[in-house]
Image (tube, rainbow, N blue to C red):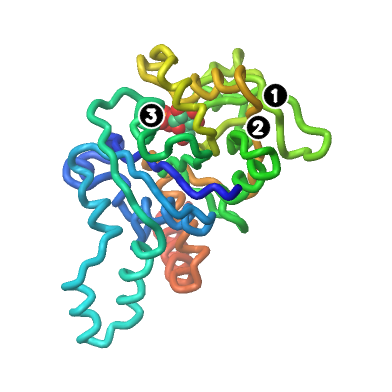
Amino acid sequence: MNIRKAVIPVAGKGTRFLPATKQIPKEMIPIINIPMIHYSVMEAVESGIEQLVFVTSSGKETIENYFDRNLELEKFLEQNGKEKELNLIQNIGSMIEIITVRQKEQLGLGHAINCAKPIIGDDTFAVILGDDLVRSKKPVTKQLSEVSIANDNKSVIGVMEVPNLDTSKYGIVDGEFLDSDKLTLHMKAMIEKPRPEDAPTNLATPGRYILTGEIFDCLDRIPRGVGGEYQLTDAINMLAGREKVFAHIFEGDRFDTGNIEGFLNATVEFALRDNATKDIMMNIIREKIKTYGI
Ligand code: G1P
């Protein structure tokens, strides 16, 4: 069965982007002219998701407004013959149904996902973390959905190889590769942010998951984990003890836009990959190299 629902948690405070995030949700900070959350929602749309749950907190209303229509602006653009701009603002909100639920306390990613339980119910659903953008031929959530569908709609964790020293930044999976598919593992365990010496593998999730409804029962039972927070990773680890869970090495380039370095990297890279901005960015880089003698 196709995966039709997705959860995108957007309740975080975004402290790494202060002072901007004092007033602007970090998800609304743009890479050039496109807010980061737009990429996550497009990934969902292009993966066949029909219903999206934003887990929000106070101060995140701009995100809901962004995906709603702005009739006044539409009228203005129409009257001024700005068709291209009109298309840019009209399309995305109409492609997907968006529902918001509030996370009243910031008790961790696991707690945030659990807030979506009344809407998701028993369905298998996707989770997309907006701090990581993935550019790929096929949207990464679609890649994982296909693995789930091929395996009885079971859970699939999207993973990538990271340097051994970086395991403490991620949820890390352990498991055995399937004979039939050398990019997919039958997952045995998942550990949140292990030290390199404790990490069973260097296969890390950048926040892409397909999960069965059974995850909610696990989320209800896990104790607080790393950082005193309810960790989604701990619930997935419990889930793997109850039913089959898979991990899949996805195709694509991933950008960690949750910190300033990754954000700058994505900005330059996205400009270089877009025909409209490629030459502009190349010229800027050439000039900078001349000026600073790098
Ligand atoms: C969260 C998850 C972690 C995952 C990471 C991806 O951590 O808990 O398992 O690898 O997102 O970005 P956070 O970065 O929110 O600390």
Find numbered disc 2 in the image and state the secondary structure of the residue it sits on.
Answer: strand
Three-letter amino acid code of the residue under disc 2? Phe
Residue 62: which disc?
none
Residue located at (23% from left, 44% from top): 60
- Per the image, the residue denoted by label 2 is 246
Residue 114: which disc?
3
Q: Earlier in the sequence, mark 1 or mark 2?
A: 1
* Between marks 1 and 3 in the image, the one whose residue lies nearer the viewer: 3
From the top left corner, tell me how far across and down residue 21 is, in percent. Answer: 22, 42
Q: What's the CA distance linking mark 2 and mark 3?
A: 21 Å
Q: Is residue 37 above or below residue 116?
A: below
Mark 1 CB lies closer than 8 A to ligand 1: no
Position of 194 with respect to 289 (left or right) is right
- Whether residue 261 appears in this view of the structure is no
- Per the image, the residue denoted by label 1 is 175
Q: Is residue 290 above or below residue 252?
A: below
Position of 173 with respect to 104 (left or right) is right
Q: Is residue 192 above or below residue 286?
A: above
* Between marks 2 and 3 in the image, the one whose residue lies nearer the viewer: 3
95 or 9: nearer the viewer: 95
Residue at the far front in the pictured view: 122
Residue located at (48% from left, 53% from top): 49
Q: Are marks 1 and 3 in contact (CB under 8 Å)?
A: no
